[in-house]
Image (tube, helix red, strand yellow):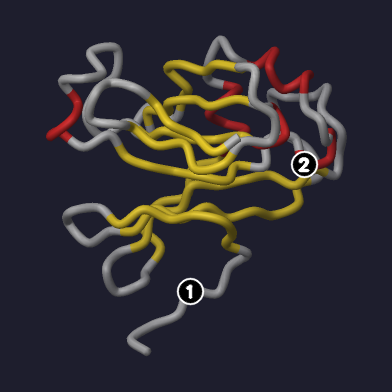
Amino acid sequence: LKWTYADNTHHDFYVEKNGNILVLSQAFVESHDRLKNLYYPALACYIVTLSPEGKELERVGVLDLFANSPYTPMLGSSAQPWDVTHTNSIERLEPEIAGAFPMFKPGQVLLSFRSLNAIAVADLPTKSLVWAYQGMWRGQHAARFMPNGHIALFD
């Protein structure tokens, strides 16, 4: 055992080529300054960037990603209002396959939101969603960028 990270992490993580680790975490919140109409207390999800040594480098709130995007209305479709997004997978778009996704930039991340029956792509530096889609799937997991320009997920 080299290190531990004590947080309420769950479901998925992604190891970047530089050794940093993107991990999904969650915590209850009593409110959000721009999302007043949600059910509170809410289980909020976070994307946490850890160094290769396990030190927290950055924490981005998934509710902030929605609040900084045109996809905020999707939050009203949650199957579980107290667990509004339930983020269950994360993957960074690597430069090697970014050409297959001209609508996204290398480094953006693909997320799966179980409670919304949605997948989305987030830009972490701007803390916003750049694309989101609700499909025929329900409670999906494991959304992944495929080299052929498709997105695969487990429904």
49 w.r.t. 136: above or below: below
Q: On the picture, is 100 further left or further right than 25? A: left
Please tell me which residue is depicted at 56% across the width and 56% down the height of the picture.
11
Please tell me which residue is depicted at 57% across the width and 41% down the height of the picture.
141
Q: Secondary structure at mark 2?
A: helix
Q: On the picture, is 120 further left or further right than 32? A: left
For label 1, the residue is 5
**x then y, percent, for residue 4:** 45, 80
Classify the position of the N terminus by image quarter: bottom left
Mark 2: few, some, or many residues within 10 Å (few <14, many ≥20)? many
Classify the position of the C terminus by image quarter: top right
Please tell me which residue is depicted at 27% across the width and 21% down the height of the picture.
149
Q: Residue furthest bottom?
A: 1
Q: Nearer the viewer, residue 56 or 98?
A: 98
Q: Secondary structure at mark 1?
A: loop
Q: Nearer the viewer, residue 35 or 62?
A: 62
51 w.r.t. 80: above or below: below
Sequence-wise, the earlier of marks 1 and 2 is 1
Q: Quadrant of residue 130?
A: top left
Q: Quadrant of residue 136?
A: top right
Q: On the picture, is 83 further left or further right than 72? A: right
Q: Quadrant of residue 117?
A: top right
**x then y, percent, for residue 112:** 54, 35
For label 2, the residue is 83
Identified by mark 1, the residue type is: Tyr
Q: Nearer the viewer, residue 31 or 71?
A: 71
Identified by mark 2, the residue type is: Asp
